[in-house]
Amino acid sequence: SAASDVYKRQVLDCETEESTERSLSAAFRCMPEDLYDVFDSLDLDLIYASAESPDEEPNKYLLERLSDELNRPELPEQVSWFHFTRTLPGNEFTEGLLPLGKVLPQIWKLLIDTAPSAEIARELQSMQKNGVSDFQYNLKAPDSFHWGPFAYLVPAIALHSQSLSQHDYLGMPEIVEDICNGLNESAGFQLFDHFRELLKPCIVKFVNNAHDRGQDTLETACAYLYGCRKREGPSSSWITCFDAGGETISASAIASVRFLTSL
């Protein structure tokens, strides 16, 4: 329908290879086969290993080649983003995605309420009141620069954090890891495994206005689909991030909450 065509054109969605193909076909006003014809005519590794290596970054070069061969793309008006975390099963994020400064009291309450003993619960209460012996915690907690919420454009990178030099957010939220490290430092309790078992990995998808991110997200989407076409594994070219800058992502912007059972 006309309505669905407008939706496809306006929202860049890299949740899957198929959704990315739809988004880019709409952006370039072409058939998927047209995209793949351009990809098949290129070998970026060879191009960048040659003496005439382009000056542009590969993602930008790839978008320019598609633009030259097909059409100048329409930049997305909205972008789907994917927030990786670990949380209690059944969490539907009814308050939205909260920045660290707003969600931190809830995190402390969760950790204290689910501590494996009364002694550890008291130790956590003391830490919350008197301070955490962890540099990373003390860097992030008081400074809204570090509050996010953060998200990625391409969720296919989620299970490859180590090889891509990213924090494993599905393994443990950074701030919970920081608190666990502080507890181990000050009291000798190791609770990482306890809370890892309690909390379950999930990916929260939300839609946000593109603002000035239309160009770089489109470049990353092209790199992702090119990599899929070439049967390449996830790479740093698939990484572009979103930072809400300490603002809440409203519940109405959340499209889905997907818990992963295989981790």
Image: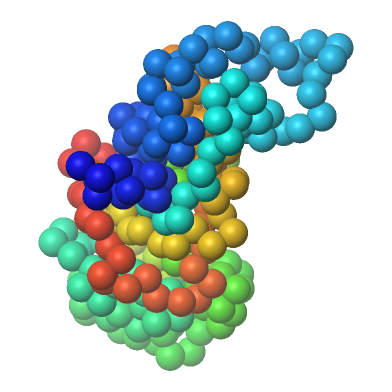
Which residue sits at x=49%, y=12%?
A: 37
Q: Nearer the viewer, residue 52 or 158?
A: 52
Q: Quadrant of residue 229?
A: top left
Q: Seen from this angle, which residue lies furthest left?
A: 90
Q: Is residue 2 left or right of residue 140?
A: left
Q: Nearer the viewer, residue 176 or 185?
A: 176
Q: Seen from this angle, which residue lies furthest front?
A: 2
Q: Nearer the viewer, residue 229 or 151?
A: 229
Question: How many marks are shown on the rendered structure?
Answer: 0
Q: Position of residue 120 (x, y in %)?
A: 30, 75
Q: Is residue 140 above or below residue 35?
A: below
Q: Is residue 3 visible?
A: yes
Q: Quadrant of the C terminus?
A: top left
Colour theme? rainbow
Q: Is residue 87 above or below residue 43?
A: below
Q: Is residue 98 above or below residue 190?
A: below
Q: Is residue 170 visible?
A: no
Q: Quadrant of the N terminus?
A: top left
Q: Quadrant of residue 34?
A: top left
Which residue sits at x=41%, y=62%?
A: 208
Q: Is residue 18 left or right of residue 114?
A: right
Q: Quadrant of residue 172?
A: bottom left
Which residue sits at x=30%, y=84%?
A: 122
Q: Seen from this angle, which residue lies furthest bottom?
A: 129
Q: Position of residue 190 (x, y in %)?
A: 37, 60
Q: Is residue 126 left or right of residue 63?
A: left
Q: Position of residue 80 (x, y in %)?
A: 38, 52
Q: Nearer the viewer, residue 192 or 236?
A: 236
Q: Position of residue 91 (x, y in %)?
A: 18, 65
